[in-house]
Amino acid sequence: MAGIPMGEEGEISNLWRFAWYNWCIFRDRKAPFPEETEVLGCCLGPARGQGNKMAQCVLKGKVIARRPVRPLNTAELTSPIIRKKQAVLDVAIKEKHGVSLTTPKSRR
């Protein structure tokens, strides 16, 4: 791996861990410790200029920068509860942001 000019290797794990719109889990910061809850979202890629280099842009109704973010594990990928949450979130995202071929209802 090529190093940066200072002779140090750059951290790239935030780049290869997620593909575009991969489902992910992040912690809800609104809940007080230790009641923090894990929240489902869609990872959109590194959040440049937000937090540290490991921060990711996550779509959860709106785009937010979060860390730590983790991919769904095997059990979560096959969980009926998670699949239902994914379907609900997909509908909410499509209603708010539209799809690549249409615009949201509010923008028409």
Image: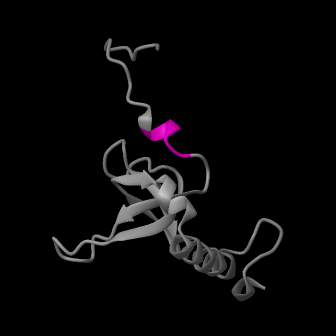
Looking at this view, is 99 or 13 the one in front?
13
Residue in the image at 36% along x and 44% along y: 54
As drawn, the residue found furthest toward the left would be 33
The residue depicted at 36 percent of the width and 19 percent of the height is: 9
* Main secondary structure of the magenta stretch: helix
Residue at left 38%, top 62%? 26
Considering only vertical position in the picture, is 73 above or below 16? Answer: below
Percent position (x, y) of residue 59? 52, 66
Q: Position of residue 38 (x, y in %)?
A: 35, 68
Up-down relation of residue 51 to residue 64 (above or below)? above
Considering depth in this image, is 25 or 63 the residue closer to the camera?
A: 25
Residue in the image at 38% along x and 30% along y: 11
Magenta part of the protein: which range? 14-18
Vertical placement of residue 63 versus 56, above or below: below
Horizontal relation, residue 104 to residue 30: left or right:
right
Q: In which quarter of the image is the C terminus?
A: bottom right
Q: Which picture quadrant has residue 31?
A: bottom left
Q: On the picture, is 59 further left or further right than 101?
A: left
Residue at the right extreme of this rendering: 101
Left or right of 105? Residue 63 is: left
Q: Where is residue 3 in the image (x, y as percent from the top left)?
A: 40, 14
Q: How many marks?
A: 0
Residue 35 belongs to the span the image colors magenta: no
The correct choice, above or below, for 16 with respect to 78 in the image is above
